[in-house]
Amino acid sequence: MFTALYQIAKNTFRESLREPIFLLLLLVTLCLIGLFPIFSLFVFSAQEKLVIDSAMATTMVFGWGLAVLISSYAISREIDNGTALLLLSKPVQRPVFIIAKILGILAANTVFCVLCCLATLISLRIASDQFRLDYTVMGVYFGSIALAFIIAGIYNYLTRASFPMAAVITILVLIPLVAVFAHFLPYEGQRVGLSKALIPALLLIMFSVWAMGSLATALSTRFGLISNLLLCLVLFILGLMSDFLIGRNSLEKWEDVPSAGKGVLWMASYDFAPTELADVGKWEFPRTIDQGEALVVWSALDNPGALPEKLGKNSMQAWNDNDEWKNDLGDLPGRARKLAIYDIENQSWDILSVADEQTTVPADATGMAAAYTSYVFRRSTNPPRNPVGGNYLNPYPKKGSWLATAVYAAVPNWQLFWMADALANKLVVPTIYVLYGAAYVVVMNILLMLIAVLLFWNREVGKQIIV
């Protein structure tokens, strides 16, 4: 079984590289990425953002398109021309056949993504100056692509081997050498090197292409090229909008009680008015409460004592817990009812009522004078979405729908793989996030393989060639 799995996967990988469309899309992508530094000149110190955004978007879009095309060629065409029937007539089980096809296609997608990622690093190195480009690196980059085609042409003429595959293999050898050359080549006497911070974001782009490759292969067991393209396009758009279309109705663990724990505590708020008797769903974007330099203390009393003033710039070191105010939620004797945040600049406290907020409204208040602010909390490592739901009579968010939660988990969320915004804000993509992304894609690929096996289980593979 493993021998058949390996041989079919290897042949699928080789056939994918031999496809002219693979070489064509690879050439277009590499040339576009290499030309982006030219468009970044004189953009007021935003050349890095332009190159990164454009190169990552190009890699993602062309990689997804290539995944759909080669999966359709590898599955639909083999079913139509009888190759699949020939293989399945031998002691090759259907699950082995389809899983090997997926692995071979993923290997071909990996080659495409690795080359595009290296090209992105080189392109960013070329655009290291907003007024000048490193034409030496650019010339070597495009020269290596031209040299790869010359070598592939000579090899094809001498051996009659596949020109597209020879060109891809040659590019796969030359582009890493260009990357090494660009990394160590000084620019105006200074060592610039390739950007290491960009590598995690590029890995996430490659993970998204893997997911699309498995999805396209699973669909190609039942659909042709055009139908596969349309379905993948629909799932792509749905995945981009999943937070808005589905995620807002999924189950959210928002609570009106701030909980102790190790994760980051997020708080969202909304000013409710008596006129809002219907669902509003307009909470403020969540903000962190117990992380950072700000001093945050809690109290379980309705009317705690006064807080010390003038704690200075090092308020965390100057603070000492007392019977009424605690820095750690876990030290409270009961439910947190008051939250106090120390303003270092003004040397003052901002005290909030975070329990039974509506009781802060005077009994004789009417109209907008009866408005109050309600708070909800959530423990989460990653920034959560806005909570959904709430009205004046019941201000706390809805729990959401189990069905929406299941659909939200099943539909690939492509936004999770897009880190260009984080890079633009000079943020470092954590290694743990990349590992979570890898685990997410592995689980997704396993599920898609199972779906592909189920779709292919009773697929007729010989009907098309019966005359």
Image: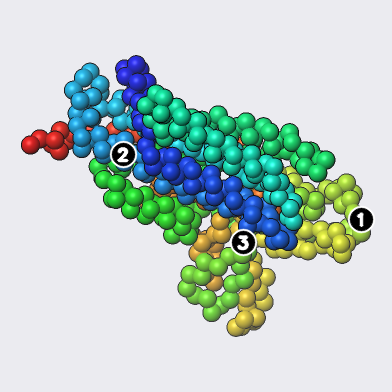
Identity of the residue furthest to the left in this view: 467
Tell me which amino acid carries mark 1. Answer: Gly
Indicate the quadrant where residue 86 lies. Answer: top left
Tell us which disc is closer to us: 1 or 2.
Answer: 2
Residue 71 lies in quadrant? top left
Residue that mark 2 sits on:
73
Numbered-mark total = 3
**Of callouts 2 and 3, the N-terminal one:** 2
Residue that badge 3 annotates: 285
Location of residue 29 in the rendering, given as x and y in whole percent from the top left corner: 51, 46
Local SS, label 3: loop
Q: CA distance from mark 2 to mark 3?
A: 46 Å
Q: Nearer the viewer, residue 158 or 205?
A: 158
On residue 370, which mark appears? none
Distance of label 3 from label 1 (alpha carbons): 29 Å
Q: Residue at x 67, y 60 (%)?
A: 354
Q: Position of residue 182 (x, y in %)?
A: 69, 37
| Side of 458 where 98 appears, left or right | right
* SS for dot 2: helix
Q: How is the image coloured?
A: rainbow
Tell me if label 2 and label 3 are in contact, CB under 8 Å. Answer: no
Give the residue number, with chain letter if any, for mark 1. 312
Q: Amino acid at mark 2?
A: Tyr
Query: Which badge, 3 or 1, comes first in the chain's sequence?
Result: 3
Residue 333 lies, with reference to residue 168, above or below; the image says below
Which numbered mark, 2 or 3, is in the foreground of this view?
Answer: 2
